[in-house]
Amino acid sequence: MVLLALSLTLIQRRTSEQLNWDAITEMDEHNRPIHTFQVCNVMEPNQNNWLRSNWISRQAAQKVYVELRFTLRDCNSIPWVSGTCKETFNLFYHETDEAHGVKFRPAQYTKIDTIAADESFTQMDLGDRILKLNTEVREVGPINRKGFYLAFQDIGACIALVSVRVYYKKCPFTLRNLASFPDTVPRVDSSSLVEVRGACVDHAEERDTPKLFCGADGDWLVPLGRCVCSVGYEEIDGSCVACRPGFYKAYAGNIKCSKCPPHSFSYGEASAICRCEKGFFRAEKDPPTMACTRPPSRPRNLMFNLNDTCLLLEWSPPSDTGGRRDLTYNVQCKRCGPEPDRCQQCEDELRFLPGPLGLTNATVTVVDFSAHANYTFEIESLNGVSDMSSFPRPVAIITVSTDQGGPSLVGALKKDWASPNSIALSWQQPEQTTLPIIDYEVKYYEKEHELLSYSSTRTKAPSVIVSGLKPATWYVFSVRTRTAAGYSSYSPKYEYETTGDCKYLRQSKVLVCCTAVRPKYRVFFGWCCLCFKGRYGNHIIHSSYWLDYLVSLCRYQCSVEAPKDVRVKFCSHNVHIPYPGIKTYVDPDTYEDPTQAVHEFTKEIDPSRIRIERVIGAGEFGEVCSGRLRTPGKKEIAVAIKTLKGGYVERQRWDFLREASIMGQFDHPNIIRLEGVVTKSRPVMIVVEYMENGSLDSFLRQHDGHFTVIQLVGMLRGIASGMKYLSDMGYVHRDLAARNILVNSNLVCKVSDFGLSRVLEDDPEAAYTTTGGKIPIRWTAPEAISYRKFSSASDAWSYGIVMWEVMSYGERPYWEMSNQDVILSIEEGYRLPAPMGCPVALHQLMLHCWQKERNHRPKFTDIVSFLDKLIRNPSSLLPLVEDIQSLPESPGEEMDYPMFISVGDWLDSIKMSQYKSNFMAAGYNTLDSVARMSIE
Ligand code: ADE
């Protein structure tokens, strides 16, 4: 916040018969002169003494602050003045465009406030020369004219006005993310922000439009977008500085200048690219980050294998590839007669397989050659910069006489059988072999990962079982023969697939997978999958008999002792059984007949037991009413009744009743309780317990500032406990928000609004995402927005937002920012700041819930125990974020955190012990350094 003081000269006015204010210079307790305006007509009744300022230009401000410093005499310390002596005075203002010549007319002035003293002085204080100075600040505005006057009305007090400061707040010029933002005056309305676009600093360019929002208190909020240093420049301390000689930066971005890659250099400053040394080159498509390279050396170990029809040439890659990977080979051929100097080119008369040029493997097969001839082959290696060099290309040379005979090729390969991990192959032996076959070499690799999965095996028989393969994977095979004369060339390639793990997978509807945990070590040891034919459809699987059956199959399949924690996966649905005896949520949508789910999880209520009293709201399907429910042998209770309005189709009836089928499975003090449903008569109704205070967001807005921090934490604890129950049941809420929490007369908060997709249809906050889903953006975790990864961890994110809503008494998360800006700012690491009056410990917990990596967020069980600790130790809630932020940053001056003695204790308490060393390494070794930590 930048304060702008305006000068103020007081002009005194005499009105009617009243005595005036006097300009008096006094000495303060340190014997320094102070200029004051005083009035002290406490003996006479009906005082009306005015003092007016000069005209004050409002400049850019719409709202100004007036700070008054004054002393005021205690009336009790003056004898005989009761009834005439006053202990307050009034502050007024008058807006006008004219700076001069405005006559003082009290009736034109608007009252700002009556000002009272916190401390008044007595005769004794005067004797002791104690100056009891009061400071009061008042807001004035909105001011629409060019300027204004201030006026002070005395009505019989004994006052000395020591100083008046008039100022306004502005967000000061700042540099953020390589963009500059000008001085900006906030809006008068404290809940709306001014959006300011930044300008990139020199040698920087825009990435996403840089924006900041100026808040009412003159603080910059929510940095969005950024600029990045241009090519040849890097960021140093907030500006873009040229790369030094020997360094370069080829791309605009948030990266540093890099040293020139090997075999390159830069002489000047701000280089975008480094030039290659002599003899080294950069190919057209080489990136500037790549080293300069040179042509390769010659191929090595050139050999041949010859049989009746084929000549196989094989060699090893060159010892120097020139620093590149795009190595290829060209073959040239010469045929020489009896005189070696009578040679002629022969590429055209032979056939090369796969070809004579651009070979990527160090081998080529030559066919259609003549018998009794001498061929000379030259193999040259090339790479992407060979054409740039003017040196002759080095070659490897071999001469082959076709008089010799070599081993023959095998016949066609055949797959005999395949399993998930093996394939059995056989082939025909070569028909004519001059020499006996020593063995066969079988070469194979995964079709999709040729280079990573090359393998070979040998066999003496013309068949092989290749094992150790992956299930449901295509492999490529070829075979060659070995005799005393060497190898034949490889057979053509044959492709075969291993079988999948689940034999019935294709024709089945249900794939059941189990994970089990060893009871002693609780170690996750993997999935085992069983495949069932379609007849074990989803609906059957809900019976505990089938679950037991699956668990025992899983046990058998995975060879473990009795598994304690078993997850059974039905196609895409997860059914989670945490421990035997604890119930698991069953998704009613997995029932083929939804009526069956309603029947199983809800109680039918006879409508004659319900008395509807009042309409209290409107839901998506019909009215919501309050009323009473009678149950024989029990006390009548208050209930809320949701009704389904007439004219619905079957799909709507099911969408309406789905919520009841879900709610009916829960039984927890912080989950709204289902009393029952009416489905057998009209209207169809869902009857739940009545919550006197309605939804939490509106309740908090109506009672802004009314609760103690402990009461608010108590509410949050209740919500967390309800969410822990839901996550233990394997239920993901997806729409946790204060509007979906109900509050009863004892301030007990209960989670409500169940029904998966339907809740989002119903929720006015839910907006369509680019992928077509309807999502309440401000409450939803980034992974759920981007790719619909909803989980208890995404519910934990929403819980953090609910905490923020509660601590700010129902403020809208991210205020009036657009959904798109919310998504962007979260992506850039911005998180909601602590609401006013929010304890550090609670804001830390919120930030913990808003971690990008969902596995790093706290579990609901951690949240409940953390809040329990805070409630047991109320002093841990005393440090407020604003107290800490306003502390001077002086080393050695540490805050008092009663609950956590050390950073280590705190991390232990929030189940983040694994980060202790990271915190220490980063220098966060005191709790107040942690409290000052920014989100980056
Ligand atoms: N509005 C919606 N459900 C309610 C309930 N159970 N109690 C009070 N108001 C409600």
Image (cartoon, grey):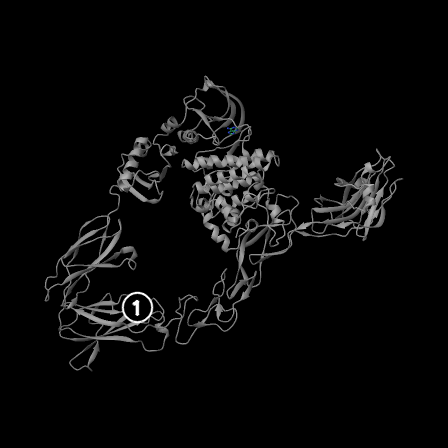
**Residue 733 at what x, y percent from top left?**
45, 37
Q: Mark 1 points at which residue?
A: 328
Q: Residue at x 47, y 38 (%)?
A: 735
Q: In this view, does 169 lie to the left or right of 298?
A: right
The foreground one among 202 and 584 is 584
The foreground one among 490 and 166 is 166
Label 1 within 8 A of ligand 1 by Cβ: no
Q: Is residue 926 left or right of residue 604?
A: right
Q: In which quarter of the image is residue 501?
A: top left
Q: Is 285 drawn above or below residue 830 in the view shown?
A: below
Q: What element carries label 1?
A: strand
**Type of residue at label 1?**
Thr
Q: Is 342 drawn above or below residue 704 in the view shown?
A: below
Q: In this view, does 850 lie to the left or right of 299?
A: right
**Residue 799 at what x, y percent from top left?**
50, 40
**Residue 10 at what x, y percent from top left?**
81, 48
**Residue 340 at what x, y percent from top left?**
19, 81
Asked whether residue 629 is in view, the answer is yes
Q: In which quarter of the image is residue 881?
A: top right
Neighbourhood count class around disc 1 (C-alpha, 10 Å): few under 14, some 14–19, many 20 upward: some
The foreground one among 455 and 126 is 126
Q: How many marks on residues?
A: 1
Asked whether residue 776 is in view, the answer is no
Q: Is 686 drawn above or below residue 708 in the view shown?
A: above
